[in-house]
Image (cartoon, rainbow, N blue to C red):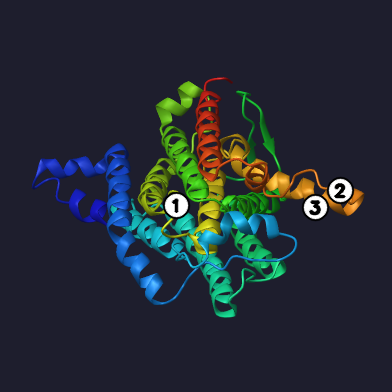
Amino acid sequence: MLYHFLYALKDRFSGFNVFKYITFRIFACAITAFVLSAILGKPVIKMLKRLNIGESVRKTKDVASLYEHHKNKEGTPTMGGVLIISVIVLSVLLWADLSNKYIWIALFSTVWLAIVGFIDDYIKLTRKESRGLTAAVKLAGQMVLGLLIGFLLYYDPNIGDRLDVPFFKNLIVHLGTFYVFFSALVIIGTSNAVNLTDGLDGLAIGCVSIVALTYCGISYVTGHYVISDYLQIIFMPQAGELAVFCAAIFGAGLGFLWYNCHPADVFMGDTGSLALGGALGTVAILIKKELLLVIVGGIFVAEALSVIIQVVSFKTRKKRVFLMAPLHHHFQLKGWAESKIIFRFLIVAIILALFSLSTLKLR
């Protein structure tokens, strides 16, 4: 919005020419998102408390040992994802080039999954239990979005069915019509993986912020003809604008982390986790770095795999591989302090992000 209004005035005042540059708008968007999230955080938390929107911690035989670690979280305001998503949308509308169709696709994906998550959280709240939408209904909502985006991008001449393979300069796989289903798989997988990671104070939003910052840089170089040619990666016209979108996620994430760090004053709920995961997956698809997401989001992958391994092992062998899944709960039951698990996971996330950036040159 500011880009369109103020850049148009550059002939009257040359200073407005700065709005032309994506680099300026990246920093401005991140700062705006952080400030809005930090300022609005306290009143939003007060509102959630007033509405009695609090976390419900299950106390059943299967999770009795975990309850002792989490009983102090009972009643903590949740659905803070409403704040994160609202700030992201507002910041992007302020600083992004709104004529860029990829910005609208990314926003659409984020808001769609935020609505799915909101419904899930609302059901949990009204029923006063930790189970919301059934897995089938939640998956259906994610799948419809994934297939729709996959279909749109498959017929986009700038995207098509190409799949870039990390570490190889000229290896591009063409998936044909399967690309539609592959895109849906990326969005569904990332959305659910972030949702599974959201179990400890600051863990999910911290990892999301790190991945968003990484994809902010990758989006910028992917949309820069000279740099992308130098790195020999797929050049995607207009993809650079997605760096502004990623900057909004990063800034909003840091602002929310101010209140979500241990011990948390608020949780994001499925409203935030499903939407943020889907947003990252959508960006990865739009800039043709889907496979790189496995490395950048290695923490999310590990959390999701731990659940899959646990379920398969128990159903086939009647034995558990982990004390509890997702993975962060396994370490909790091993006696690790919550803060130690969070910081160690975030350290690994940073290392994975740095390694992922190095793959742009290691080709």
Q: Give the left or right position of residue 244, taking residue 350 as reference.
A: left
Q: Residue at x 40, y 45 (%)?
A: 250
Q: Secondary structure at mark 1?
A: loop
Residue type, label 1: Pro
Circle 2 residues within 10 Å: few <14, some 14–19, many ≥20: few
Any mark on residue 184, and which? none
Mark 1–mark 3 contact, CB under 8 Å?
A: no
Circle 3 residues within 10 Å: few <14, some 14–19, many ≥20: some
User: In the displayed structure, would residue 184 be above or below residue 330?
Assistant: below
Residue type, label 3: Val
**Residue of label 3:** 311
Residue 109 versus residue 99: which sits nearer the camera?
109
Residue 176 seen in render? no
Circle 1 residues within 10 Å: few <14, some 14–19, many ≥20: some
Residue 135 versus residue 102: which sits nearer the camera?
135
Which residue is the extreme one toward the left?
12
Q: Give the left or right position of residue 325, taking residue 7 as reference.
A: right
Q: Secondary structure at mark 3?
A: helix
Any mark on residue 263, and which? 1
Image coords of residue 336 (percent x, y): 60, 40
**Residue of label 2:** 319
Image coords of residue 88 (percent x, y): 38, 56
Among numbered discs 1 and 3, the one appearing first in the sequence: 1
Q: Residue at x 47, y 48 (%)?
A: 202
Query: Quick one: quadrant of the N terminus?
Result: bottom left
Residue type, label 2: Lys
